[in-house]
Image (spheres, coloured by chain):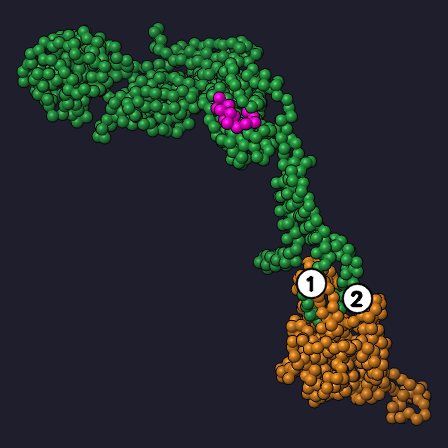
Amino acid sequence: MLFDESFLRKLERLSVMSRRAMAGQLQGERRSTKRGQSVEFADFRPYSPGDDFRRIDWNAYARLERFFLKLFVEEEDLTVHILVDASRSMDWGDPNKLEYALRAAGALGYIAMAGLDRVTVTVLGVTSQDSGKTDYFSPLRGKQSANALFSFLEAHLPIDPSPDHPVTQFPNRPAAQLQSYAARAQNPGPLILISDLFEHPSSQSPVTQLPIYQSLNALASKGFEVTLLHTLSSDELRPELSGDLKLIDSETGAEVEITADYDLLQRYRSGLSIWQNELRLFCGARGMHYVPFETSLPLEELLFAWLRQYSVLK
Amino acid sequence: MNFLTPLSFALTILLPVIIAMYLLKLRRSEQMVSSTYLWRRMVRDVEANAPWQRLRRNLLLLLQLLFLLAVILSLARPFTWAQGSGGEATILLVDVSASMAATDVPPSRLETAKNQARLIISNLPEETRATLIAAGESAQVLISTSTDRRLLLQAIEGLQALPVGSDLTGALELASAIAARQPDSEIVVLSDGRASLPERLALPGQVRYIPIGTSGENQAVTLLTLEGSASSENLTAFVQVSNFADAPVTRRLGLYADDQLIDAHDLEIPALGQASVISEIVPPETKIIEATLVEGDFLSLDDRAWAVNRGSNADNQQITLVSPGNRFLETALGLLPGVETTVLNMDGWKSGRLGDANLPTFQPSNLIIFDSAIPTGTLPSDSLFFVGPLASTELFSVTGTIETPIPKPAKEDDPLLAYADLSQITILDAAKIPLPEWARPVIVDETSGLPLLFSGEVAGQRIAVLAFDLRHSDLPLQPAFPILIANLTGTLLPGRVGDIPTQIKTGDTVTFTPLPEIESLKITSPDGTSTQLEIQGGRAVFGDTRQPGVYTVNWEAGPEQSRREGSLQFAVNLANPEESNIQPVENLSLFAEQADAENTPSQQARREWWRLLAWLALLLITAEWLVYNRATLAKLGNQVTQNLKRET
């Protein structure tokens, strides 16, 4: 099990926030863009033949001798999209980034399910060769679906904590998968992407032209309310390397030669903060939430303090 | 700049080797990271394609190259020519006499000489052996043919000006002896030239004279005496002040009696002349008088002089002679120095003894001589000398008379009989006294073996008995008589130190003969240090008279239970016109010819620089290590500051 009983009960106090009303599929608890049947008045509309005359406002007819329909806000459910980057670079660090990401996804999914929202989870970066694993959890709602969600996520937990598995020749491209996700998505809603955002730039293109940024742009334009949970482990934030090293990418096997001296580590740290600033600016400009955090942060603190502060949850 | 081993520059081929090692530095340990994304992003602008650019701004490489350069340079042993001594051996001769304490070249002449000596030492070539001779009252080799510069500098540091004359001749002889053993040596004389020099002295090697000092401005108290005056109670002090400067000066002279100012005079002293002061107002009880020239000149050592008064009556030994009248004995006692004799007849003695208020009580005496008289009642507790006793006393008993005894020394080398020849003495008769237990015989009758003179101690009381009446013998007419009396009184009187001069010069050795009974002698210097003197063969020698001032001799005599103590003072003054005359001598005639004969090239000395470079290399390699470990050091620093913050 990913969580214990008491933690789940605590999670029920939270709910996923949505900044604007979105159309849903079924009756739910969220304001929808549609007009429908609820107690909250929305608008008047002139009667046109065929309308249900039960909804005519007779008081208005008495004053104006014209038919007006009284429209109410429809309350529907919301589809919460959770995307977990499970590329090899995520399977790293202590505590493990992937495990952390899956637990966060489970907790967020449970929160949404408990709030009568539909939850769909997609695990990015998993090749189809990884037999027996599906990378898509189709939208489900209600607390009774939580177990299905948890078992789906557990299937993706890192099996071998030591990262000595063979390096794949053709790495998956989470960015490309995101793009296609944006293209396929039917019910845009809050979208939470949990990733370390490490990419493999093929060309010297400007930063904002990188695939990940384009994918995020595509998601935003589709109407998703993107929240970017940027997961980094402590040894990525503060690498403790020294001497002349040949660094090997755990994902691609690419090599970088460095002389890890004081200067270089200083530059690494400043480069990291520049990168995070870039992301923050990029997300801020597009109304996305950018939440950088370290995996040493307890999950509870992330959910109850950080995400509430960023108004992802309430 | 020249180099001793320019071949070392061949090592510069190591420089490209270091650079090549940097370029070829390819062996890297592999390290798996989650993603190289960030590293790549960062390294993109750093990791240039051209290896040359990697060398740019590489501090480590720069430091290593500089270190190697410094090492190579120091190995090449660069040197420059400097003013200094050449040759294979140098003999430094530093004058440490009183005149070197003059302060005309601040801080003092000796300090200037020391600085000069240090300069010479530091400019010496590496392999030159140096000898350091201090020329004080006697020449002293402090460091002999050493190449240890540290030792030499230490010895130079330890030089001190002594208030003594300078024996430059002895020092030069010593130096020439050392120079004769070492070819190609140079003798450097650091002096003000105020020294007695021989007319002609063959000095091997070259001699350099470095005069020290600029001014001869000095006045000195050259003479101070203190004497009793015939006309008045007061003592008379006589002071002579000499001016060694070229111009007349006015100095104030203060006279202190036992540290109390009693007299002051403003003296006008002509150039190179003298002025005298006679002060007749010195109180008679004065023990020490000091003459001081107030306000300094360049040499303060000779501005003070001391004299002690030992001749005052209080110090005299008192002898009471109880006699019907004995001119011989009175004359002999009158000859003794420091002795005051009171003559009484038996009636006078008795009345004094009985304490009759009408008669003047005589002073307590140290020795009572009973000549042909025996006191009634208890004997006094002073030292006693009986001459020709007529009756028994509690100390001895008279049993009869010996007719014409022949005197003979009981022991050959009795100190009481020193210098006294007894062979010519004729005696009419003597009292027959069996030798008491406490006594030892000094003179015995040759036939009967009975003592004619014996002495000894009873409970600390010294007693001597001469068995015959002086008027019944021709002893008083013999030369032996005053000697015998002097010996006897010397033994019987409470101990005296002996003959110590009242005034000596600094550096002089005091030799005196303490009386045989003196067991312990201690001399306290003006600065408070005490020296226990050893008495060897009846003589004591004290040579540590380098400080001007008043010395105190403390003595102890007698056995444990009846210890007698006393003290005595003597003054030590510089009073050395040669040293007080501090006018520096620019050229010593002795060296003039040699200085002319020598030309300058050999005055050049090599000064090596490799030490400096070696230090530089050490600094560079330390800096390299710090730069290499700066990440660790920065982390350590952070931890420390964090800990400090946490604590505060």
Callout 1 and callout 2 share a chain: no
Taking depth in this image into account, of B342 and A17 the one nearest to the observer is B342
> Which amino acid type is shown beneath numbered disc 2?
Glu
- Left or right: residue B457 compared with residue B257: left
- Left or right: residue B268 compared with residue A106: left
> Which amino acid type is shown beneath numbered disc 1?
Arg
Name the residue located 65 percent from the left edge and 72 percent from the top edge: A94
Residue B180 shown in magenta:
yes
B117 up-or-down from A219: above or below? above
Residue B375 makes an appearance in the image: no
- Left or right: residue B257 compared with residue B643: left
The span picked out in magenta is: B173-188
Q: Which residue is the extreme one toward the left?
A: B400
Q: Which residue is mark 2?
A: A278
Q: Measured from the top left, where is residue B33 in percent x and y?
A: 70, 70
Q: Which residue is mark 1?
A: B27
- The quadrant holding residue B523 is top left
Q: Secondary structure at mark 2?
A: helix
Residue B451 makes an appearance in the image: yes
The chain under label 1 reads: B
Per the rendering, the colour in which chain B appears is: green
State the CA–CA distance, disc 1 to disc 2.
35 Å
The chain coloured orange in the image: A
